[in-house]
Image (cartoon, coloured by chain):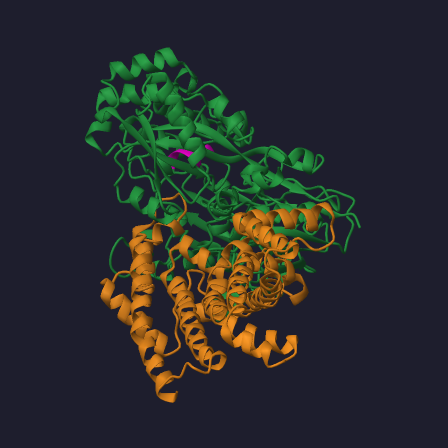
Chain colours: A green, B orange
């Protein structure tokens, strides 16, 4: 019985790497009491895809390490996701464009170097400089002078950004190219971590064994198999490790890790193979985690194709959205590890942060009769048929088929919608970026920081950095600018929600569901939870024996 | 003999160039690998262009291949996207896979030939029937089903062994993965040996040996088995390469970071340097194993001579 369940290991194997696509995680918050020192946590790990540099790591596995060995100006509270000051004493601005950053005195890197204004300015200049080929360079695009260090063609005309100015050892100012009221709240992302002088003097040595200012230090690292992190002795922050260390162990496959957890050879996993989701709560006798995370799955349309950008196609898009039975699919296919979407953000933002249960409203509610009418009014599916493209090396076939099934049932036509598998994630993404899509395709977004801005601006503003649908709406752009210039975060959230209402009408991408963070842990440890980036909050884990 | 080996070695050169070129073309046909590194985000075109230049992906395909091939001769197998040289990747995964492959090879050769000999000598009797039924079952169960079942039963349910191989892949932990990896080939070796032994049992030279009054032990080991092993050795030789390259499933199930796993990772990330590097070494293993098989023929059967 068990073997038949595990037959789908190939899908699981592919999901290991590909679930970890978008961005990395945040970190912890204030410390709790009652630690049992000395014990080492053994945790699941996947081989990071990129060198472990803060501005070059954009996926979860590398992000895990950075979040353990680094602390940024801000940190996202592991319970609420709210941005709090960590290394920063204060970040203030009177005009929402120039921000003054004051750093708390006394912070040190694990090699003894002090964390000061230069640690940040140098790290950010390094991350932005085009010749350093950092994958996260675009995170510095708001800083004045970015265009000079990161031109769209040719060589950079400067090596540092003029928007970064050191005032004294512990103070610096950041000038942006435009107003951006939520900017301080983005500074918990790993791309903004400080770097010690040791990084710049010998980058190769640093990469073999990175040095940071976080609660852990790397004691040994065997690429491709294991990293041993130990509690830092000179950590300056409040969120000290409550265990002796963490061993990150690379697993070839999620199923294998799950088996090791059951056998007691592993303490924490933050991935559960799809085939095991149904048994996991009983297998792990309650030590199973299933909670909302900052990930939304959507179905995007190629609005750059003539037949998908007509007013008729707009009705068709709305109709398709209403033809998808979200509650049934999340329950049957995903065993409730997804939550039907009601907007374009994520529940981890909370109502205050901009999450809404009503913004998509009717358009995201299953209504077969209305769906059919809308699609017919819009002139039917362009070309009489639609496809949903997805990467076949991820765990997507089952839900794509289910969505198509749902649409086909509504339309009473078994061939109205079919899945279109594309071999690898790499090929799929390059076809999407090269505007080669001709019909619907899967899109997913994992937040970089828990802000409504991060769910909307990169994806739906004209020329947004990840606007795969190539949606362009002047009203939306106007509201986005208004939100960025808002004097406080409440006003910003409200403007963003106004912008989001345009998405509910225009439907450039259909919200499908929010992805939950799933994980499990052994009886040997306690205090395990996942943050809103679906990464375990390692420093809070206590070891019992 | 020497000339024959030399000729065979020379023949390897075009095979080697041809296979690496084919693999290179195949990885390239998968598309552009750079977009995937940005995850679900649209790639920053300037950074993407720089990375393409770093990995020579901006050059015409033939030039990429020439540059890659030039690198091989200077010992440079290229760099993985993680910034790690592929040669380091190979240096840490080949020993692991070699250990696993040899464990499997020993199991399949020793157990397979012994089982085949016994059932060939007792054809039609109970031992033979049981052995044949056993091999049929093993052949019909896919390797990953067998792997997961044994892993779950022995590792989790009864907890007699570690379900996964720990860091460093110690030999005693490789026995179960080796057995799983060897299982199907073991069944084939048994069946091949059995057929061959049963056939040769009726051969003239065996009858002569028996008539000479040689002890049965000597008849079986020196005359019967030795001559019956030719097809088996052919199979074992080609299987040695298959065990190394085909260990992917077993490596994944038992968490062994060997060649199969790294190859799979390379394909997924579309790192042509990694994939071509590993496959190149696999090709060499195949070629050398085949040559050894041909040379072994002469040892086993004195009638075969190479000029």
Labels in figure, total: 0
Q: Residue at x 39, y 18 (%)?
A: A363
Q: Which residues are magenta?
A: A451-457
Furthest-front residue in this view: B211
Q: Residue at x 33, y 48 (%)?
A: A427
Furthest-bottom residue in this view: B2
Furthest-left residue in this view: A306
Identify which residue, B28 or B209, lies in the foreground. Answer: B209
Identify which residue, B37 or A193, lies in the foreground. Answer: B37
Residue A241: image location, x then y, percent:
69, 51
Query: In which quadrant will I find the N terminus of chain B?
Result: bottom left
Query: In which quadrant will I find the C terminus of chain B?
Result: bottom left
- Name the image quarter holding residue A382: top left
Q: Residue at x 68, y 47 (%)?
A: B153
Residue A251: image location, x then y, percent:
57, 53
Q: Is residue B30 visible?
A: yes
Residue B154: image location, x then y, percent:
69, 50
Identify which residue, A415 or A315, lies in the foreground. Answer: A415
Q: Is residue A73 visible?
A: no
B57 in magenta: no
Give the left or right position of residue A242, taking residue A477 as reference: right
Identify which residue, B88 or B214, lies in the foreground. Answer: B214
Residue A9: image location, x then y, percent:
53, 45
Q: Is residue B234 above or below residue B218?
A: above
């Amino acid at each position: 019985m068990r073997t038949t369940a595990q037959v789908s290991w190939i899908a699981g194997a592919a999901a290991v790497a590909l679930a970890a696509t978008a961005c990395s995680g945040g970190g912890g918050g204030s410390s709790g009491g009652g630690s049992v020192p000395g014990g080492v946590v053994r945790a699941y790990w996947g081989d990071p895809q990129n060198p472990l540099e803060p501005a070059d790591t954009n996926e979860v596995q590398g992000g895990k390490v950075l979040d353990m060995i680094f602390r940024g100006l801000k940190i996202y509270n592991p319970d609420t996701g709210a941005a709090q000051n960590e290394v920063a004493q204060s970040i203030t601005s009177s005009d929402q464009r120039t921000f003054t950053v004051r750093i708390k005195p006394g912070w040190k890197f694990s090699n003894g170097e002090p964390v000061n204004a230069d640690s940040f300015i140098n790290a950010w200049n390094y991350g932005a400089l085009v010749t350093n080929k950092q994958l996260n360079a675009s995170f510095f695009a708001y800083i004045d002078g970015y265009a000079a260090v990161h031109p769209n063609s040719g060589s950079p005309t400067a090596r540092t950004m003029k928007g970064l100015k050191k005032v004294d050892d512990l103070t610096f100012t950041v000038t942006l190219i435009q107003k951006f009221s939520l900017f301080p709240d983005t500074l918990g992302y790993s791309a903004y971590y400080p770097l010690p002088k040791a990084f710049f003097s010998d980058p190769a040595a640093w990469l073999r064994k990175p040095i940071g200012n976080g609660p852990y230090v790397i004691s040994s690292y065997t690429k491709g198999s294991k990293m041993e992190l130990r509690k830092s002795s000179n950590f300056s922050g409040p969120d000290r490790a409550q265990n002796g260390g963490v061993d990150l162990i690379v697993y070839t496959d999620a199923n294998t890790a799950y088996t090791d957890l059951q056998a007691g050879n592993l303490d924490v996993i933050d991935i559960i193979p799809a085939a095991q989701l149904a048994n996991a709560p009983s297998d792990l006798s309650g030590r199973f985690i299933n909670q909302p995370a900052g990930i939304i799955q959507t179905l995007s349309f190629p609005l750059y194709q003539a037949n998908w950008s007509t007013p008729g196609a707009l009705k068709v898009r709305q109709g398709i959205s209403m033809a998808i039975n979200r509650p049934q699919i999340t329950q049957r296919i995903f065993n409730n590890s997804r939550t039907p979407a009601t907007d374009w953000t994520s529940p981890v933002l909370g109502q205050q942060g901009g999450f809404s249960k009503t913004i998509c409203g009717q358009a995201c509610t299953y209504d077969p009769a209305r769906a059919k009418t809308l699609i017919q009014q819009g002139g039917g599916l362009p070309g009489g048929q639609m496809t949903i493209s997805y990467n076949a090396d991820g765990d997507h076939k089952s839900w794509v088929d289910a969505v198509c099934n749902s649409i086909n049932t509504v339309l009473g036509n078994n061939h109205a919608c079919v899945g279109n598998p594309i071999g690898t994630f790499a090929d799929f993404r390059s076809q999407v970026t090269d505007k080669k899509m001709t019909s619907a395709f899967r899109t997913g977004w994992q937040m970089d920081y828990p802000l409504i801005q991060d769910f909307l601006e990169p994806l739906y503003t004209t020329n947004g950095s990840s606007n795969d649908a190539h949606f362009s709406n002047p009203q939306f752009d106007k509201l986005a600018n208004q939100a960025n210039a808002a004097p406080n975060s409440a006003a910003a959230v409200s403007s963003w929600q106004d912008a989001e209402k345009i998405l509910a009408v225009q439907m450039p991408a259909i919200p499908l569901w929010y992805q939950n963070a799933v994980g499990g842990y052994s009886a040997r440890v306690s205090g395990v939870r996942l943050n809103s980036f679906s990464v375990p909050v390692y420093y809070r884990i206590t070891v019992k024996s | 003999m020497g000339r024959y080996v030399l000729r065979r070695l020379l023949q390897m050169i075009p095979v080697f160039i041809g296979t690496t070129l084919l693999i290179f073309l195949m990885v390239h046909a998968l598309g552009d690998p750079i977009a995937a590194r940005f995850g679900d985000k649209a790639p920053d075109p300037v950074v993407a262009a720089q990375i393409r230049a770093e990995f020579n992906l901006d050059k015409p395909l033939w030039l990429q291949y020439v540059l890659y091939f030039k690198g091989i001769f200077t010992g440079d197998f290229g760099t993985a996207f993680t910034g790690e040289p592929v040669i380091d990747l190979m240096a840490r995964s080949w020993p692991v896979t070699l250990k696993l492959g040899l464990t499997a090879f020993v199991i399949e050769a020793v157990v397979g030939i012994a089982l085949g000999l016994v059932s060939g000598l007792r054809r039609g009797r109970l031992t033979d029937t049981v052995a044949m039924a056993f091999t049929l079952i093993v052949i019909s169960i896919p390797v990953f089903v067998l792997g997961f079942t044994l892993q779950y039963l022995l590792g989790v349910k009864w907890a007699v062994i570690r379900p996964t191989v720990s860091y460093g892949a110690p030999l005693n932990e490789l026995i179960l993965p080796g057995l799983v990896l060897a299982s199907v080939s073991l069944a084939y070796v048994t069946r091949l040996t059995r057929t061959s032994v049963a056939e040769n049992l009726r051969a003239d030279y065996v009858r002569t040996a028996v008539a000479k009054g040689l002890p049965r032990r000597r008849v079986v080991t020196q005359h019967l088995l030795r001559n019956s092993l030719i097809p088996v050795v052919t199979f074992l030789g080609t299987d040695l390469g298959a065990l190394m390259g085909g260990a992917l499933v077993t490596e994944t199930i038992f968490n062994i970071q060997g060649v199969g796993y790294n190859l799979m990772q390379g394909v997924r990330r579309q790192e042509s340097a990694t994939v071509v590097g590993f496959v190149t070494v696999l090709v060499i293993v195949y070629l050398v194993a085949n040559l050894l098989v041909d040379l072994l023929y002469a040892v086993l059967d004195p009638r075969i001579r190479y000029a």
